[in-house]
Amino acid sequence: MREKFSTVVFLIFFLVLGSCAQQKDTETAVHPVLQGTLWMQTSPEYQMVTREAYALAKIRLDEALKNKSWTAAVEQSGNFADLPPAVILDVDETVLDNSGFEARLVKTNSYFNRRNWTDWAKEAKAGIVPGALDFLKYAVSKGVHIFYVTNRSLDLKDATRKNLELKGFPVDASGDNVLTENPEKGWGSDKSSRRTYVTKKYRVVLLCGDNLNDFITDDKKNGPEGRKSLAAKYQSHWGTRWIVLPNPMYGNWEAALYDFNYRLPRPEIAKRKIKALQTFQ
């Protein structure tokens, strides 16, 4: 009887020990977007950087309006000098702040997927990237047309418009200045076709975004070094015609580290990220 009792006690002990260890691992595990999300939500440095970016955007906008030979879109050609001026901006992490969605993923220990992103977008709760609203109001006061070129899907267009309107961003009543992905028009994740669409009627004086693809076609075959080389080809555009916003949470910079293979197991993705680190030894 005592032997059976001892066996039961040991089994319970190891079960409890294992449970505690598992709980400890869960509590100490670091979600991939934890640090980036915390930085965006809690640091004054993030707000300083985005406000600086949009302060520079105002300066560049004034310069562009005085120089009719100026265009920010590599897709623009022909006689565009007398076309009305327009600014093209990305939406997520450029004008709308989705760090609340990323925080939700961290707290629920979940990851981005089509369903949870759609649910979030339809809530229309994304905040304002510091400096963005002030800049766009300034641009509109100068007679500049605003276009939002986003890789949100077509079914999220109305929700995106609603979110922008709720935050006070300038949105056409028709919604024609919110350009989502649209398979019927051949608008995929490469934003070049939508930039070309805008250049047909407007002189694009400025591009603003948080991802290389917001400015130039970023082939997903490019690894980190290929993306750096592509960006270097347009060195004169950065800070003049192109204004980039910081996004440490996600983007092509991160996906390029594991060849855009989103189906890889999380441990493998983490392994590849660590391998990409440089210690300068």
Image (tube, rainbow, N blue to C red):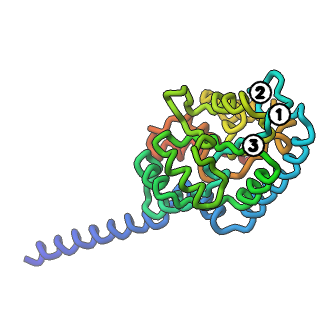
Lower position in the chain sequence, tag 1 or tag 2? 1
Q: Return the x and y of residue 85 as percentages of the image width and height.
A: 79, 39
Lower position in the chain sequence, tag 1 or tag 3? 1
Q: Which residue occupies the foreground of this view, 229 or 15?
A: 229
Q: Return the x and y of residue 61 as percentages of the image width and height.
A: 84, 46
Residue 68 vertical placement versus 49 (above, below): above
Secondary-structure class at tag 2: loop
C-alpha gap between disc 2 and disc 3: 13 Å
Q: Toward which corner of the image does residue 135 lie, by quadrant?
A: bottom right
Count of marks placed on residues? 3
Q: Residue placed at 79% from the left, 55% from the top?
A: 138
Secondary-structure class at tag 1: loop
Would you name the residue on which mark 3 appears? 87
C-alpha gap between disc 1 and disc 3: 10 Å
Secondary-structure class at tag 3: strand
Give the side of residue 120 with respect to residue 63, left or right: left
Label 1: how many residues lie within 10 Å, few (<14), some (14-19) or many (20+)? many
Would you name the residue on which mark 1 appears? 71
Give the side of residue 133 with respect to residue 58, left or right: left
C-alpha gap between disc 1 and disc 2: 7 Å
Q: Which residue occupies the foreground of this view, 199 or 265?
A: 199
Would you name the residue on which mark 2 appears? 76
Q: Mark 2 and mark 1 in contact (Cβ < 8 Å)?
A: yes
Asked whether the viewer can see residue 266, the reply is yes
| Extreme-bottom residue of the structure | 2
Q: Amino acid at mark 2?
A: Gln
Asked whether the viewer can see residue 222, the reply is no
Query: In what quadrant of the picture does the C terminus appear?
Result: top right
Q: Residue placed at 72% from the left, 36% from the top?
A: 215
Give the side of residue 239 with respect to residue 4, left or right: right
